[in-house]
């Protein structure tokens, strides 16, 4: 693990965990690779060497609290700094000792967090707790993990409790891989822990990312969590080695790796969709990879099944790169014939192949996570995600020496995944626009005719204007004068989470971005991110940023916004600045790339009845009706910006498909919400439902049912 | 209200509009020129009223039938198909005969096992519901309540069904009382019939022009349980496995019986201490006090900048009980799949009226499991569906109660219905009040828009829906065609009526 924050991430702690869940450990073919030792930060004070990790384990990021309410019991917390435990790389893997369970949950969570920090170039922060009115956000230092929270084959991340609840359940006779009467623990599955921690990390990055507005949203969350689990698993040195040795003769990587991926899938207990997307055994007993189906997305809407398509697409890209990068090894090993001699393959070859696979896994894992900063703030689609993966990789690594991007595009195309409005699948058309391109798109869009372009001179001066406005945001000392608010209106409407006090009551310094320091305490980082979000909000609504809103796909002009758009107290269309994050990433060639990532959205009341919508949009109702009529849903639109803080340029503008005033987009969301989207398998399925049995799950525990139902 | 009279030929189908629930009164001409009246289900979800109250509907049924129903059919034992029968107006009502699915048959051992399992699980759910009530917060309890209500027929707190941990008795539920009342009434006349799928073709006494083909529910318990392939603990299904002391229901029962909430844990006892004593434990009491907290339920004040370690909102005392909802859903599905599915055939024109109750996927796919041999070749489910002119849409139009597919698909689906000339008359009836259903938490997508669209398309607009005062003419349909249809239709605030003549379209 790379050291990212010297304060916390000092020396390394080694801890043993199950590589697969214990039920697989009992099978001969996986027995000898079942234990791995992970390396995580030791959590010691770097100056004094005093441990900062307390029994639980309770560290800087994670706290394991082992209560089992179904059994009415609490289990003693493990102390990983106890000498005997420390000397042995932690407790030995054991199903019967809850303290090992605590150790494993902690260790795997920390590995996952480390991978996110490395890919995103900043410390991980959990989603804050919001007060009921949404006005106040409270810092949540640690993600809580309850290893034995539930009795049942379900585990989930609770955004409400900022906690992961893991379950356990007795095995029944019908399960072919387990002995009846024994108990299966979710907290002993590397992949389940990783999957849930990934949900938690995602919630910390994108607060509204899980609002289902199209069939891809829930599917993306599941797929993304599975991808992180899968590639993290593959990236442990040695995990693949044994299997590569064992599967000699099947070394094309084509089936071997996919088959392995399936085994991981089964270990999560929710792998049936994943299994089928990767491959299956035919009637002749021979296992084959599922060949890509470019039309699969048209009919599959159940989130896990749909998500499996995204996993399969990225997995296929991984295999393409693996094949390209190991072709030379095969030529060397076979004197160019491509045919391996009988018997075991040479140990050096196995070692080299495993190294390549591990290296590629690490790279793909980083690509997959890094793309999170390049997603629109709401309404994610698989196509958007493809653009995010490509753009993020391009920005960091312009060369693409090993063909990762080409492989991704090829594979996505084969699975029929493409952005909504993109006609070609070139790297160029799969890159999010910079400011200039964004300007041109919004101009042509506004004109409706296409080819009316600004003259180069006008364009340049317009871009300069933006740059100067951004520089103002980052550097200017003076608060912008604001005639919108008088002394009698000290506050912006509380509808906005990011509402600010009036200009006169806030200090000057809070009107611009605070400088970031990499060495900061996480709470300080969080505070900074909060105050920067406020500064951004202020700049956008009342400062120089207001002239830039149209470029970002925001509607701030009262005249252009339907009356259903939420407004500030002063009647201005409101904007929520979700986050201002700093990212510092190191490219493979060693260059440091710094970004400010800003997410902003607007919201609008949506109604299931188009007639009601129209009336509400126009305000064709009496006042009482207008204020009391609750919306049936909320439509959101907005953008993510990547700003280069050094040059004050807006590098990427990532907008949702429509603005908040876009009636067609609102209608599309409505159609999806009311289940008009499509048909799947032999059931009419809205795709809205995280589970097959319920139309829409509650908002508080969106993942609870999603996971409960997806049992293989 | 006058008596409801049968048409000269065919049938008049009256769809009552009590709210989100089923109630159909059918009038067939008898061989002697009289009227044979059949009531299929009578219930609604409380709170879903459109215009008429359930009492008004009940009164109207009594008047329209002259106080006697020749036949009552209950498709399955759910509140929204049953609670109307408990109306006061029905006290004196006579029932000539009652038909139920084989799953109600007390002499059928499979049926008895299913019902016993259902009862056990329901008691477990009621217990989980009560425990959630202690400090589980409102939302989870509300979801569970809605599901339990379907099974009981009334609120869990009502009329002595559930009087605390000891007195839980589903036998006293509204559903059971309604079923018992109907059986008792029918026994005084011609009696009760338990209908098995693909068995004898049924006849209505004195109505020789109509035959009734039973298509479901399936005999296979796995199909009844099947809604989609789901994991463990599903009701009913699967060979009996020995109950594990580490199962969810075991924990629910333990909490109920000894009151201290301790059941068999998954580990050796040396590792655990009771949660309520954990805070005082000499070695790690301070850990649990600091990180879990036991005392006050006062939540974190907004003035705090950081969430403290022992914040009450992060505790999980009842989260595990929410798995009950999962069980409850499976239970609901299991009961939906016990729906009696009947195809009424008008002999002369061979038109079919298809009443499917709330049958979901497992029930649907079993319809092809048998057939009825005839001289001219067997009558099959595919054949019956192809001749369907009226489809009572399954389960309020929910996503899994009308299967989609093509005419070539191997399983019954919407595309099998109404082939050839039968398409010209094809009509659908949806018993749903979406304004109410979409307000439920979680949302009940009744009807699912995709299904509604498919039905409107397939029927050329001939769709009745409880909350919509009259079918709406699609622009693509000619005025002539529409007025032909509307000539057979009567719409009131109380019901819709539609005639189907037993002659070619």
Image (cartoon, rainbow, N blue to C red):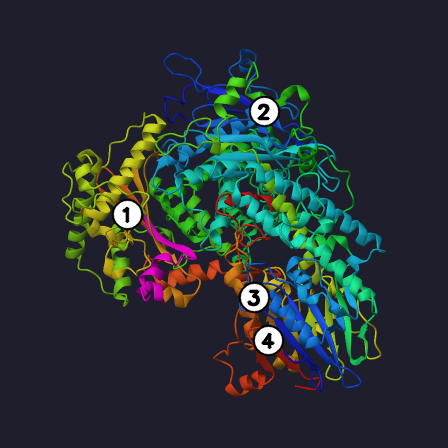
Q: Name the residue under label 1.
A: A493
Q: Where is residue A489 in the image (x, y as percent from the top left)?
A: 20, 46
Q: Mark 4 points at which residue?
A: B496
Which residue is nearer to you in this view: A404 or A493?
A493
Name the N-terminal-most of marks 3 and 4: 3
Q: Where is residue A604 in the image (x, y as percent from the top left)?
A: 35, 56
Q: How crowded is mark 3: few (under 14 residues within 10 Å), some or many (20 or more)?
A: many
Magenta stretch, residue numbers: A615-640
Q: In this view, does A299 lie above or below A337?
A: below
Q: Where is residue B458 in the image (x, y as percent from the top left)?
A: 58, 74
Q: How crowded is mark 4: few (under 14 residues within 10 Å), some or many (20 or more)?
A: many
Chain of residue at mark 4: B
Chain of residue at mark 1: A
Q: Is residue A127 left or right of residue B459?
A: left
Q: Is residue A239 left or right of residue A202?
A: right
- The residues bearing labels 3 and 2 have C-alpha atoms spaced at a distance of 51 Å
Q: In this view, does A311 lie above or below B27?
A: above
- The residues bearing labels 3 and 4 have C-alpha atoms spaced at a distance of 21 Å
Q: Position of residue B58 (x, y in %)?
A: 65, 68
Q: Name the residue under label 3.
A: B451
Cβ atoms at labels 1 and 2 below 8 Å apart: no
Q: How crowded is mark 1: few (under 14 residues within 10 Å), some or many (20 or more)?
A: many
Q: Residues within 10 Å of mark 2 (few under 14, many from 20)?
A: some
Q: In this view, does B121 lie to the left or right of A139?
A: right
- The residues bearing labels 2 and 4 have C-alpha atoms spaced at a distance of 60 Å
Which residue is nearer to you in this view: B71 or A440?
B71
Name the N-terminal-most of marks 3 and 2: 2
User: Does A400 lie within the magenta span?
Assistant: no
Identified at 84% across, 52% down, the residue is B109
Chain of residue at mark 2: B
């Amino acid at each position: 693990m790379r050291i990212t924050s010297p304060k916390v991430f000092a020396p390394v702690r080694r801890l043993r965990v199950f590589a697969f869940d214990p039920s697989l450990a009992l099978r001969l073919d996986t027995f000898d690779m079942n234990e791995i030792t992970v390396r995580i930060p030791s959590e010691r004070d770097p100056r004094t060497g005093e441990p900062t990790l307390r029994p639980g384990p309770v560290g800087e990021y994670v706290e394991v609290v082992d209560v089992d309410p179904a059994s009415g019991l609490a289990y003693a917390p493990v102390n990983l700094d106890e000498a005997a435990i420390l000397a042995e790389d932690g407790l030995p893997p054991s199903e019967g000792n809850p303290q090992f369970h605590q150790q494993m949950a902690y260790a795997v969570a920390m590995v996952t967090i480390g991978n996110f920090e490395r890919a995103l170039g900043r410390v991980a922060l959990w989603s804050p707790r919001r007060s009921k009115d949404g006005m106040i956000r409270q810092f949540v230092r640690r993600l809580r993990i309850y290893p034995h929270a539930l009795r049942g084959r379900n585990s989930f991340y609770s955004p409400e409790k900022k906690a992961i609840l893991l379950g356990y359940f007795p095995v029944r006779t019908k399960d072919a891989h387990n002995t009846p009467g024994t108990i299966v623990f979710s907290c002993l599955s590397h992949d389940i822990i990783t999957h849930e921690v990934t949900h938690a990390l995602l919630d910390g990055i994108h607060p509204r990312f899980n609002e289902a507005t199209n069939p891809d949203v829930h599917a993306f969350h599941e797929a993304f969590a599975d991808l992180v689990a899968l590639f993290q698993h593959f990236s442990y040195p040695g995990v693949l080695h044994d299997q590569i040795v064992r599967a000699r003769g099947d070394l094309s990587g084509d089936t071997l790796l996919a088959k392995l991926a399936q085994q991981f899938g089964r270990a999560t207990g929710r792998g049936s969709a994943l299994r089928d997307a990767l491959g299956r055994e035919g009637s002749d007993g021979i296992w084959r990879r599922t060949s890509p189906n470019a039309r699969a997305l048209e009919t599959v809407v159940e989130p896990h099944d749909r998500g499996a398509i995204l996993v399969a697409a990225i997995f296929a890209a991984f295999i393409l790169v693996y094949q390209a990068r190991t072709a030379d090894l095969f030529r060397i090993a076979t004197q160019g014939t491509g045919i391996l001699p009988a018997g075991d393959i040479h140990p050096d070859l196995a070692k080299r192949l495993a190294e390549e696979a591990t290296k590629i896994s690490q790279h793909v894992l980083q690509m997959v996570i890094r793309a999170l900063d390049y997603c629109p703030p709401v309404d994610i689609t698989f196509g958007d995600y493809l653009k995010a993966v490509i753009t993020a990789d391009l920005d960091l690594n312009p060369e693409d020496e090993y063909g990762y991007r080409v492989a991704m595009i090829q594979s996505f195309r084969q699975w029929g995944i493409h952005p909504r409005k993109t006609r070609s699948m070139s790297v160029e058309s799969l890159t999010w626009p910079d400011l200039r391109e964004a300007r041109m798109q919004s101009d042509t869009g506004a004109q409706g005719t296409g080819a009316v372009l600004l003259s180069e001179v006008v364009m340049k001066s317009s871009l300069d204007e933006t740059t100067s406005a951004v520089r103002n945001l980052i550097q200017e000392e003076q608060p912008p004068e604001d005639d919108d608010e008088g002394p009698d209106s000290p506050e912006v409407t509380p509808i906005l989470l990011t509402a600010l006090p009036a200009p006169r009551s806030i200090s000057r310094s809070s009107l611009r971005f605070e400088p970031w320091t990499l060495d900061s305490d996480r709470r300080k980082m969080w505070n900074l991110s909060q105050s920067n979000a406020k500064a951004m909000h202020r700049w956008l609504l009342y400062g120089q940023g207001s002239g830039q809103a149209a470029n970002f796909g925001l509607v701030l002009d009262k005249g252009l916004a339907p009356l259903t758009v939420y407004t500030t107290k002063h009647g201005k269309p409101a904007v929520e600045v979700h986050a201002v994050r700093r990212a510092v990433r190191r490219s493979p060639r060693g260059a440091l790339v710094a970004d400010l990532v800003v997410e902003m959205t607007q919201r609008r009341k949506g109604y299931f009845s188009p007639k009601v919508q129209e009336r509400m949009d126009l305000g064709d109702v009496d006042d009482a009706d207008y204020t009391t009529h609750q919306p049936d849903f909320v439509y959101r639109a907005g953008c993510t910006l990547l700003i280069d803080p050094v040059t004050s340029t807006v590098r990427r503008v990532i907008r949702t498909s429509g603005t908040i005033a876009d009636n067609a987009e609102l209608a599309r969301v409505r159609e999806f919400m009311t289940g008009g989207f499509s048909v799947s398998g032999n059931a009419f399925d809205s795709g809205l439902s995280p589970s097959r049995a319920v139309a829409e799950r509650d908002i508080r525990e969106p993942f609870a049912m999603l996971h409960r139902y997806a049992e293989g | 209200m006058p008596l409801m009279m049968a048409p000269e030929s065919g049938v008049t189908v009256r769809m009552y509009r009590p709210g989100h629930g089923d109630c159909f009164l059918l009038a067939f001409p008898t061989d002697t020129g009289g009227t044979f009246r059949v009531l299929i289900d009578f219930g609604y979800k409380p709170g879903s009223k459109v215009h008429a109250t359930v009492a008004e509907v009940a009164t109207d049924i009594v008047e329209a039938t002259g106080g006697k129903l020749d036949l009552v059919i209950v498709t399955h034992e759910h509140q929204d198909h049953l609670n109307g029968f408990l109306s006061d107006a029905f006290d004196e009502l006579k029932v000539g005969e009652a038909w139920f699915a084989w799953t109600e048959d007390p002499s059928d051992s499979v049926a008895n096992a299913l019902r016993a399992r259902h009862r056990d699980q329901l008691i477990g759910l009621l217990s989980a519901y009560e425990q959630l009530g202690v400090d589980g917060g409102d939302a989870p309890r509300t979801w569970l309540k809605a599901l339990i209500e379907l099974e009981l027929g009334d609120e869990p707190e009502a009329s002595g069904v559930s009087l605390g941990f000891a007195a839980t008795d589903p036998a006293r539920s509204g559903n059971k009382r309604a079923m018992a009342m109907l059986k008792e009434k029918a026994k005084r006349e011609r009696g009760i019939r338990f209908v098995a799928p693909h068995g004898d073709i049924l006849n209505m006494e004195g109505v020789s022009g109509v035959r009734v083909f039973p298509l479901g529910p399936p005999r296979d318990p796995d199909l009844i349980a099947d809604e989609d392939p789901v994991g463990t603990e599903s009701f009913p299904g699967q060979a009996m496995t020995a109950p594990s002391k580490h199962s969810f229901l075991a924990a629910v029962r333990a909490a109920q019986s000894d009151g201290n909430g301790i059941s068999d844990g998954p580990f050796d006892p040396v590792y655990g201490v009771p949660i309520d004593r954990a805070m005082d434990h000499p070695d790690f009491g301070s850990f649990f006090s600091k990180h879990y907290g036991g005392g006050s339920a006062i939540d974190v004040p907004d003035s705090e900048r950081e969430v403290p370690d022992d914040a009450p909102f992060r505790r999980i005392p009842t989260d595990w009980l929410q798995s009950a909802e999962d069980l409850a859903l499976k239970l609901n599905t299991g009961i939906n799949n016990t729906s009696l599915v009947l195809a009424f055939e008008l002999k002369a024109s061979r038109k079919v009226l298809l009443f499917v109750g709330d049958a979901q996927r497992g029930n649907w796919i079993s319809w092809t499991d048998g057939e009825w041999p005839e001289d001219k070749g067997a009558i099959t489910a595919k054949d019956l569906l192809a001749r369907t002119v009226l489809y009572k849409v399954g389960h309020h139009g929910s996503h899994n109660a009308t299967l989609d597919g093509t005419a070539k698909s191997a399983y019954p689906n919407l595309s099998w219905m109404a082939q050839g000339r039968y398409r010209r008359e094809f009509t659908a009836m949806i018993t749903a009040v979406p304004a109410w259903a979409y307000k439920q938490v979680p949302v009940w997508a009744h009807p699912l828009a995709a299904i509604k669209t498919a039905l409107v398309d397939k029927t050329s607009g001939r769709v009745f829906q409880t909350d919509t005062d009259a079918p709406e003419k699609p622009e693509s349909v000619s005025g002539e065609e529409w007025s032909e249809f509307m000539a057979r239709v009567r719409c009131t605030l109380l019901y819709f009526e539609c005639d189907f003549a037993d002659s070619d379209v």
